Structures are given as structure tokens and as C-alpha cells.
Image (spheres, rainbow, N blue to C red):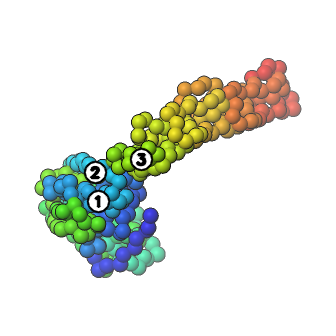
Amino acid sequence: MKTQTITMQMIFFGFLFFVTRKGVVAGEVMRLINGPNPLQGELQVLKDGIWSYACYSNWAIESTRVTCRMLRNNTYRESYAARTGYLVCMYNITCSGNEKSIDECMNGVAYKRCLFYETVAVRCGEDKIVSSTQSLLGIGVRLVNGYNQNEGKVEVGVNGTWRSIANTNNSWGNKEANVICRMLGYRTNNAIGFQAPTVTQIRCTGNEDSIDHCSIGMGNSCSSFLYIYLYCSCVSANCNDNSSRYCDVSLGTCESECAPGRYLSGSYCYSCSAGTYQPAINQNVCYYCPFGTYQNLTGQSSCKACPAGEYINMIGGQTSCNVCPPGTYQDQTGQTSCKECDAGTYQNMAEQTVCIACEPGTYQNSSG
């Protein structure tokens, strides 16, 4: 995966639910984010330097075919689903531009449901000054999903919860951007506040090799309030062109073998669940982790030994070990029980690997 940096006069941003975004980038033109695997997620398209969500109302199966082709050529079944584009946003944040902190602009703030395209973004000056201003109420601000640290979608943190800001009645502008940039320690003489657009339509014939060869339209709203969630997966018919190929569901690829850490069900190869493992290829089952071991990840070929200070005495898909309670210890890995502290020693903490000798003038005549 590549990390992309673009310098522009003005950059707009897509609107995402979470702060950290990981996704698959196909030729720096489109990407899938927030999905459980590289071939499933929310679709964003790069058009004229703008990363934006694709609107569901004008989406067609031909566009899905092109998108999946960009990811893994022609070995995929294409399907898609849409989700609503609602967030809980902060409304009525209005500044004069001279405030030192955003909480001085929040006298009439309200929390309401908003749409992705209603959220706001900021681009601060590139020069960061030495000091920043702090909120008197402990309110934090941050810029997320930008190409650089000085730009991104605005989120405001109140009582540990981060919220997007809605552009109510087009009230968001450079004055509010000045305050945000000032709080973050940037110069405010060229701060820009703006509203990000949406990809309103993508129309493909289905034969294109890349999504940027399709017709792409931009706008400031998505009439259906729904955004594309794309799913690309193997077609078992394509994988069964000979008897030695399987559809690896977790990877979305056609493989010559069902690898360790996976199991076969017909022509499909699935990842072993957490708490289980499979050390060999082309097997029909996964095994529970044995005594003294666990596995907290999926698709694994072995289990992990419980660390010293912990134990597990059961078989049944365990994803973690138990800690040794006070009065006990365990100095070895992969154990099914803990050892009691001997007479003359003690341990008042859990998850320990040794017991402590009683101090001079004290004693302990019982074990454990």
C-alpha cells in the first residue's frame, strides 16, 4: 500500500466515521476503507485531487465490475450494499475569528443527526507557530483524513467523544477556521474553512480497466443519503476451472491450495476462527487449541503458549489465558495451572512468576 501526499491550492476531504483509516489503494484512483478485508469496504474515489464517497443512487453493477477488476483482475463476484450517511454532529458553532479556543464559539451548540456531506473541513497555514491555545473547558480539536497535518475534516472532542461539525445554513467559513488553526498552533492568516463535495455519480460500461475511465460527477449532496459499500469476492466457477483451485474467501483470490490456518468447505477456503488452528494444507476442519495454549487471531496454523504468570486448563476455542491469582505463581509458559506459594513466601499480586520470601520478623506457615 502506498502513502500518498498531494500539494494543492485547496484540498477537499471525504467524510469517515473513524480517525484512523486503513484501506486498499488501487492505482491512486480509488480505495476501499473500513472493511474487514482488503476486498470489502466503503468506496472512495479520487477525482481532481478530491477523495470522496460515491453516491448510491446512481451506482450500477457495471461500476462494481470495474472497481473489483482494479483490485484483483477478473476473478471476482461483484456485489455491493449501501449504508445510510448519517452522523451525530455538532451544530451552531459560530465564531468572530478572534477567539482563542473553539469553546468560545459554542454558546448555542446542539447535537443533531447530520449527513456526511454537511461536515466541514479546514486547511491551516503550513507554518506552525511555537505556541497553541488551549480550551478553558477541556475541549479538544483535531484534523483527520487530510493529506498533511495542517488540513483535514474537523472533529471536536467533548467529554471523551469526538464529533464532526455540521455546516448549518452554510455558516462555516474562514472565521471558524481561524479559531481551529489557532488552537492547533498554526498561523491563521490563510486559514480556509470549507464543505467537502460528494461523488454524485459514477457511470461505467463495465469494460473499463480503471474507475477513472468512467464518467464521474461531483456535487455537494447525495440525494439518496446512501453511500457505496463494495464487496469483491471469488467466483467458485472461476476457481474450479481445474480440480486444484480453491476460492480463498478471506483473501478473495483463487488459490492452488487451502493454506495452513484455513479449512475447506466444498470449493471454498475459510479462515480458522480465533481459538482454533490448522497446521496443514487442504484440510476440512480446524482444531481447538490444546491445554496451556490459546489463539486470539483468525487464520492461524498454530496456537500460542500461555505466558509465565498465566494458565489455561480447558479445551474449547480459548482466545486468552487466565492470570494466576494472588497467593500463586507460574514461572513457565504453556501451563494448565498455577503453583501455590510455599510456606515462608507470599505473593499479593496476580499474574506473577515468583513468590516473595517473608521479610525478617514475619512468617507464613501455610502455602498459597
Does label 1 or label 2 sit earlier along the sequence? Answer: 1
Question: Which quarter of the image is occupied by the N terminus?
Answer: bottom left
CB within 8 Å, label 1 to label 2: yes
Q: Residue at x 79, y 34 (%)?
A: 356
Q: Secondary structure at mark 3?
A: loop
On the rendered structure, is 115 left or right of 18? left
On the rendered structure, is 165 left or right of 314? left
Q: Secondary structure at mark 2?
A: strand
The total number of labels drawn is: 3
The residue where tag 3 is placed is 242
Given the image, on which type of amino acid does mark 1 rest?
Thr
Label 2 and label 3: CA atoms lie apart by 22 Å
Does label 1 or label 3 sit earlier along the sequence? Answer: 1
The residue where tag 1 is placed is 67
The residue where tag 2 is placed is 78
Given the image, on which type of amino acid does mark 3 rest?
Asn
The 10 Å Cα crowd at callout 3, few under 14, some 14 to 19, many 20 or more, is few
Give the quarter of the image for residue 72. bottom left
